[in-house]
Image (tube, rainbow, N blue to C red):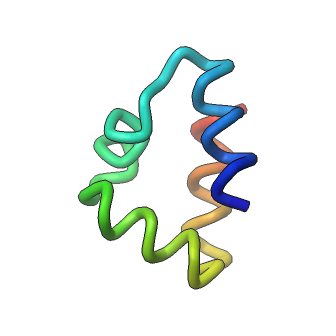
Amino acid sequence: MLKEIRIKAIIKGMKMKELAEKLGCSRELMYRKIKKKDPEFLKKIEKILK
């Protein structure tokens, strides 16, 4: 899951830190939520990376 998100972010020309800022959280919190597979959080990421 994390690898897929990283690839999509790179394609968009976005760093993981920028993605975290758009989500309104720290990079560390973002990684924890991705690893826990928080469904609402993953939907927010999907919207940003589309």
Q: Quadrant of the C terminus?
A: top right
Q: In the image, residue 47 lies at what x, y percent?
A: 65, 44
Classify residue 2 by image quadrant: bottom right
Q: Residue at x 61, y 19 (%)?
A: 12
Q: In the drawing, does residue 8 fall left or right of residue 44?
A: right
Q: Quadrant of the N terminus?
A: bottom right
Q: In the drawing, does residue 24 fall left or right of residue 37?
A: left
| Count of labels in the image | 0
Which residue occupies the extreme bottom position in the image?
A: 36
Q: In the image, residue 6 lies at what x, y percent?
A: 61, 40
Depicted 12 relative to depicted 37: above or below: above
Q: Residue at x 36, y 48 (%)?
A: 20
Nearest to the observer: residue 28 or residue 38:
28
Q: Residue at x 67, y 77 (%)?
A: 39
Q: Residue at x 48, y 24 (%)?
A: 14
Q: In the image, residue 36 lies at what x, y percent?
A: 58, 84
Which residue occupies the extreme front position in the image?
A: 3
Q: In the image, residue 21 lies at what x, y percent?
A: 29, 43
Nearest to the observer: residue 26 or residue 23:
26
